Image (tube, helix red, strand yellow):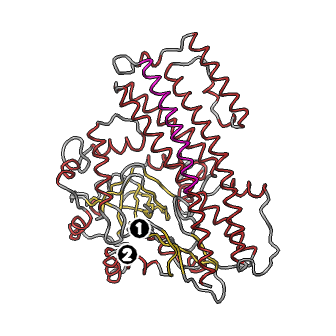
Amino acid sequence: MRYWQKRYLQISIDRDRKDQDYIRQMQKEYRRLSKSMYKEIKGWIDRYADNDQISSKEAQQILSKKEQKTWSMTLEQFRQKAISGGYEQELNREYFKSRISRLEQLQRQLYFELAEMANNQEAALQSYLKESLNESYLRQIYELTDQGAFSLDFSRYSSYALQVAISKPWKGNNFSGRIWKNHLKTIPDRLSKTMSLSILHGWGVDRTVKEMMFGIDSVLRNRMTTLVQTESAHLAEVANDKAMAETGVEEWEWLATFEAHTCDRCGGFDGKTSKELKEKLGYIPSCPDHPNCRCTRVPVIDGWKSKSRWHRDPITGKGSVENYQTFDQWKKSNTDEIKQAQEDAKSSKTKYAKVKKEDFDKFIKQSGKVSARDKKILYEGKDGYIGTTNSFKINEFLRNNEINLSDASKNTIRVLDRVIKKNTLKQAVSTNRWVENSWLQDYAKSHYREIGSISVENLLKHFNSGSATFESSGFVSTSLVPSKNLFNKVRNIKMEIEVPKGAQVFVTENHIESEMILNKGSFYEIMGAEIRQLANREIMVIKMLWKG
């Protein structure tokens, strides 16, 4: 049985390697896109720049008759490409206007290049996911029949069934919808806002190009990498479900992939059967549980017990199949911090402890390490972050890219990101954050497919569904000591955020707010929400779990 288990785990390992091969090839395509769009942006700016800047007058000037004629020819080329490629309906027809300004011409040119890339990536990823799903299914059938030792009459995926499986929405959308949203909504909006800021504030050519290319080189590539890994993992579990159903397997257990950044939530699921998870949580969590989740589920068969598992060495980064350990055993053997956390857990009645005022200095000492140079940047001056109103500007820039931000403040972002990554939380804590009502409106707009019309009833239903998530592109400041939050008397939305031990955080010396900062780009699972009566007003309390 040990060899059988090793072969079963090999399925996940092989899929991960193929995913990485696919991503490497995909990244080459995005590098080519980046070069092409850089050429478009740089050429446009060089053509219309005056004294190294783009003026509003030049940008808003309507194309000349000669330029309109050339642009009309370009539009027709794109239209024919869209028709032949089958993605004409995905495009915004407003973009096909011929009488436009110079700035609009650039925006549309970039839009069409992104559309063509989205179409190519949709076709390529569709083909890859079909192949991956079918192979995962057949490999698992093969292993579940003891490597073909006994015959089984099982159904196979038809071409149509494969298409249906990969197109079925999960967590609010399917892979196709996510690709088109990344290319035709997220990135064009970012590029448009950046160019508008460049004109408004008179940025130089180099800065304008640099700011616009950041959205393409960093944001788009990272989103697509996450998409490939998460969709592939999801479909592997779809194949897992079908394979177990075909072979009569009725029970499975969760198998966490052990890496340095394996989250405590997934680790807590490790070795648990579906029945045990249902009893513990009240529901059965989906696998993958979050973006870039590398967990899987292993069938439970009478007489068989796990002997080995996939493991990534936290020092070398290399993966291998090792003798079976539970999650707690693995963590204990790899980090001293975990040993301390386990001792803390024994003396604590609650997993996520609420911090007392007198204990805050201990958290600063443990998770607030910062060099004198970085401390000066973060705490002092108009471009600092901690205890300054500049933190609002920085987060507004990170979330919407709608404001002008000084180079010094951008350096503050880099410093804070670096400091957070150097500090880890020594014990699990429950922290809180108060936000304005506008947060709910923004959240509802970005999740309109799942929520529908904005109402308290619909929001509560969504937050309590077990599948709601939240991703913050900005830093998130929280209060370790509940009574220390400055906004608890003026805001009506309270986030109770559980942060596991080992999380990367920065506990500041801001005693007034007992501040702990979570990094930009963090992902949160929403565990539930309710309306509570507080003094003379009602508040909404949203419970979240930090996932990394």
Would you say the magenta stretch is mainly helix, strand or loop? helix
Are the residues at dot 1 and dot 2 in contact (C-beta closer than 8 Å)?
yes
Q: Residue 49's image quarter?
A: top left
Which residue has dot 2 on it?
A: 334
Q: Is residue 278 left or right of residue 535?
A: right
The mark found on residue 260 in the picture is 1
Q: In the rendered structure, which disc, 1 or 2, sits on the residue that comes first in sequence?
A: 1
The mark found on residue 480 in the picture is none
User: Three-letter amino acid code at disc 1?
Assistant: Ala
In the image, 309 versus 514, the foreground residue is 309
Q: Residue 313's image quarter?
A: bottom left
Q: Which residues are magenta?
A: 20-48
Q: Is residue 486 left or right of residue 134?
A: left
In the image, 196 versus 67, the foreground residue is 67
Queried whether the magenta region covers residue 26, the answer comes back as: yes
Q: Is residue 485 left or right of residue 42?
A: left
Where does the image place residue 88, in percent across and percent down from the top left? 69, 34
Label 1 Cα neighbours within 10 Å, binned few <14 / some 14-19 / many ≥20:
some
